[in-house]
Amino acid sequence: MADAAGQGGEGGEGGEGLFVCRAEQLEERGKGVVWDLLYCGREERAFALRFDGRVVAYLNRCAHVPTELDWQEGEFLDAERRYILCSVHGAVYSPSTGACLMGRCGRAGLIPVAVRELDGVLRWYPAGALQPLPPAAPGTPDGSDGPAKPSPQP
């Protein structure tokens, strides 16, 4: 079992958690897995990476300016695969802790998302300002007027 950095140990006390992906989708220092959630009532994205043998997950949002971090879908790490790098302003974050190491993010860090890897599955645990999206409206694949989003279920 691996828990995301700074996400309260077991995460998801009293709940099963929500499916993110199969554990084998997260390769060591590889491409991240991205999913949608609500942060303070607004639709945002989160991501998970495997780094130094454990899974970490954060809100996909730079601490300097609220913009997504990945320069391509799921690509969060720098060329040497050592740091999370903001694609817009170049802020540098520790993958292990989410702390800002360099750039305009100052003392602010990434917002952690509680995750747990168990039995080959990664799940996330809603808490506080981080909540799941509401269920899709009947008769529509994802509840929107736009193209359908892929289902987050296995």
Image (cartoon, rainbow, N blue to C red):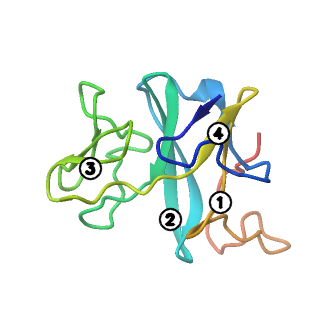
Q: Is residue 37 above or below residue 86?
A: below
**SS of the residue under disc 2:** strand
The numbered mark at residue 86 is 3
Farthest residue, direction front: 9
Tag 3 or tag 1, which sits nearer the N-term?
A: 3
The numbered mark at residue 4 is none
Tell me the CA gap for discs 1 and 3: 24 Å
Tag 1 or tag 2, which sits nearer the N-term?
A: 2
Tag 3 or tag 2, which sits nearer the N-term?
A: 2
- Label 4 Cα neighbours within 10 Å, binned few <14 / some 14-19 / many ≥20: many
Amino acid beneath label 2? Glu
- Are the residues tagged 1 and 4 within 8 Å (C-beta)? no
Image coordinates of residue 48 in percent, x first then y, are: 51, 41
Q: Nearer the viewer, residue 60 or 118?
A: 118
Q: Is residue 61 above or below residue 84?
A: below
> Which residue is tagged 2?
44
> Which residue is tagged 4?
116
Image depth: mark 1 or mark 3 in front:
1
The quadrant the N terminus occupies is top right
| Residue that appears at 84% across and 72% down | 139
| Residue that appears at 47% across and 37% down | 32
> Which residue is tagged 1?
126
Tell me the CA gap for discs 2 and 4: 20 Å
**SS of the residue under disc 4:** strand
**SS of the residue under disc 1:** loop
Tell me the CA gap for discs 2 and 3: 16 Å
Tag 4 or tag 1, which sits nearer the N-term?
A: 4
Horizontal relation, residue 142 to residue 114: left or right: right
| Residue that appears at 67% across and 51% down | 150
- Label 2 Cα neighbours within 10 Å, binned few <14 / some 14-19 / many ≥20: some
